Amino acid sequence: EIVLTQSPGTLSLSPGERATLSCRASQSVSSRSLAWYQQKPGQAPRLLIYGVSTRATGIPDRFSGSGSGTDFTLTISRLEPEDFAVYFCQRYGSSPLTFGQGTKLEIK
Amino acid sequence: EVQLVESGGGLVQPGGSMRLSCAASGFTFSNYWMHWVRQVPGKGLIWVSRIKTDGSSTDYADSVKGRFTISRDNPKNTLFLQVTSPRAEDTAVYYCARGGTNSHSTGLDSWGQGTLVTVSS
């Protein structure tokens, strides 16, 4: 099983700043099967990025994904008030699928 | 518009059983892999199970293997999760989610609102 470790656990930033979230895998993630999700309190997760860097339908271009092998990054270029939430990375493709433990992005 | 609506959650006794359902609409259900993901409120996401488009292949997390069974009824656009011998640690919100048209194509791009399962005597 591939374990995903996200850092930091909590990130405190202000609107307008740039956010950089990290996801490290215990083994190389093949076929670029890495996704990012956003979850707000009381809501289901929402797919932001799949295939490491492809934005899902309707996702603003301030969200971008990058990385390869075992190290992946979600970047939010300029934080909007609605971006403060919890973010999860996920490896999909072969079973078992796994999620990182999450990064909470909070308003400073 | 893609919609996924879970039902069937509630209180279940340890060692009992329950069946969760997920009614799908707004897309061709039979073309997509489908998944169950669970989450203890305030905690992280845990993938539970998935099923291939035609139901011919299923996968499970080790923690539920042998106790949970995923299935689907394509003519009725419905996904199921049969939960047997539940344990206290199975208490969570259970989400159904749509995968891709193949196992590696995308992440989980649509989610239901979730149904809460509480395992307690």
Image: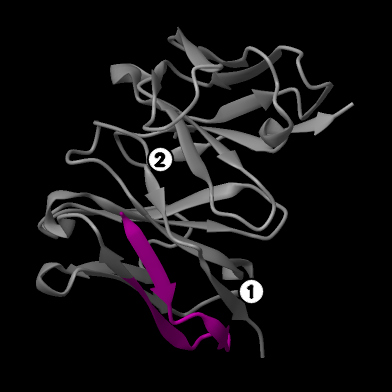
Relative horizontal placement of residue A13, taking residue B97 as reference (left or right): right
Amino acid on which disc 2 is placed: Leu
As helix, strand or loop, the secondary structure at mark 2 comes to: loop
Residue at 20% of width from left, 55% of height from top?
B27
Determine which residue is flagged by label 1.
Answer: B88
As helix, strand or loop, the secondary structure at mark 1 comes to: helix
Magenta highlight range:
B1-22
Which quarter shows the N terminus of chain B? bottom left
Which quarter shows the C terminus of chain B? bottom right
Residue at 9% of width from left, 72% of height from top?
B75
Relative horizontal placement of residue B64, taking residue A72 as reference (left or right): left
Do circles 1 and 2 both sit on a common chain? no
Pointers 1 and 2 in contact (C-beta within 8 Å)? no
Amino acid on which disc 1 is placed: Ala
Q: Is residue A26 above or below residue A102?
A: above
**Which chain letter goes with mark 1?**
B
Q: Is residue A75 above or below residue A104?
A: above
Give how far across and how far down residue A60 sits, in percent: 50, 24
Mark whose residue sits in front, 1 or 2: 2
Determine which residue is flagged by label 2.
Answer: A97
**Which chain letter goes with mark 2?**
A
User: From mark 1 to mark 2, how far is it between C-alphas?
Assistant: 23 Å
Q: Is residue B87 above or below residue B100?
A: below
